[in-house]
Amino acid sequence: MKHSSSSSLCLLFLLALRSMACDLVQAQVLFQGFNWESWKTRGGWYNCLRAQVDDIAKAGVTHVWLPPPSHSVSPQGYMPGRLYDLDASKYGTAAELKALVEAFHERNIQCVADIVINHRCADKKDARGVYCVFEGGTPDGRLDWGPGMICSDDTQYSDGTGHRDTGEGFAAAPDVDHLNARVQRELSEWLNWLRSDVGFDGWRLDFAKGYSAGVAKMYVENTSPSFVVAEIWNSLSYNGDGKPANNQDQCRQELVNWAQAVGGPAMAFDFTTKGLLQAGVQGELWRLRDGAGKAAGMIGWMPEKAVTFVDNHDTGSTQKLWPFPSDKVIQGYAYILTHPGVPCIFYDHMFDWNLKQEIETLSAIRARNGIHAGSKLRILVADADAYVAVVDEKVMVKIGTRYDLGNVVPSDFHPAAHGKDYCVWEKGSLRVPAGRHL
């Protein structure tokens, strides 16, 4: 009987620990720590960002996404060559990167490396005069590849001996053959080196449509990151009039399929929510609720695996490939920082757009009420000019131009944050007139 009692206590303790661990995993806030022009920063971007670590921590950030760390033909890092050569990065030196990672770790913020492995730029030409001889950036032969490590259907660079590409092609650089055993081994070793030598905790997988989910799964299993998010950029489905279609299930299903296939910690950026949200705030907020009454993006189906965002270095910054309406960005943050999924804050909005205080306030509400990736969402209103939802029955949020919400907001919810066309309420003892916001 004594043994049984001890076993029961141990079991309860383990279950409690597991529950706490799940909460810690779910209660995440990602921060993109760079933009398209960060490499130009005088004194080095790593040093600049290191001076802002405390401010980033105050915003409730748990993970920071850092730019591609290696030598690259393009200054932003997305055309990598000598992967082990971190001193050639335009963002700073290897020592400065390690110091930055350490500074984030001191504030209990994990660091996510931008991993660009779909394609790679060669240092030298082969006998054909084609750039397809790669240097790894070390004195030994690690990552020193030839044309046989290029996908056979990438005919501009390949010698035809490799496997066919498992994903979409990338015209600007040779597509890496991820079915090659040496490629798999040496890229896994490089990723593990980024963890052990530099201190990275997780990966952001660039252009993850360029290789199969099975390939991504292999690298995740070989490197055991604590955090993984993939760029599966799929723009919305559009009608003939140029407006988004009412049903975006095909787009979000692609994201769900990838996350399920890779498994483990793997998540995907919720491009579906981003597209619907930026269309919605322009007088079409009804788009944020699907036919089943759920959120219309990936967060409506698999919020625990969805990373929501307003803009990033591609969609916004100086590229502006798919930008959120600039005068409505804070509505976007009022949505993602109160909703399920893992929200991602963009550097520009935090430090360059004078939104730091509002973002910090919204993030604090999220933390104070224990909102996490799997929180329960109940949408109350989704009309053209107003969207209202309650999360975990603790927090209510409204975005849109409508001021009077009638009796939608109960009297035991009080305003906790407000700004242009948004308001957030918390459940509490302070009573305010029902249906009104500041």
Image (cartoon, helix red, strand yellow):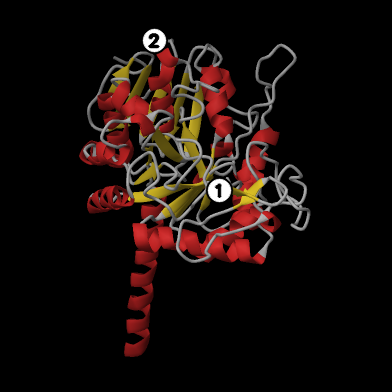
Residue 361, relative to residue 50: is it above or below? above
Q: Secondary structure at mark 1?
A: loop
The percent coordinates of residue 334 (x first, y second) are 39, 26
The percent coordinates of residue 183 (x first, y second) are 61, 61
- In the rendered image, which residue does mark 1 sit on? 123
Give the image quarter of residue 193.
bottom left
- In the rendered image, which residue does mark 2 sit on? 403
Name the foreground residue: 175 vs 432: 175
Sequence-earlier tag: 2 or 1: 1
Q: Amino acid at mark 2?
A: Tyr
Q: Secondary structure at mark 2?
A: loop
Residue 134, relative to residue 235: is it above or below? below
Q: Are marks 2 and 1 in contact (CB under 8 Å)?
A: no
Q: Residue at x 44, y 48 (%)?
A: 70
Res. 388 mark: none
Q: Residue at x 59, y 22 (%)?
A: 287
Give the distance between the C-alpha atoms of the residues marked 2 and 1, in whole angstroms: 60 Å
Residue 128 visible within the image = yes
Name the foreground residue: 12 vs 258: 258
Q: Amino acid at mark 1?
A: Asp
Label 1, residues with CA under 10 Å away: few <14, some 14-19, many ≥20:
some
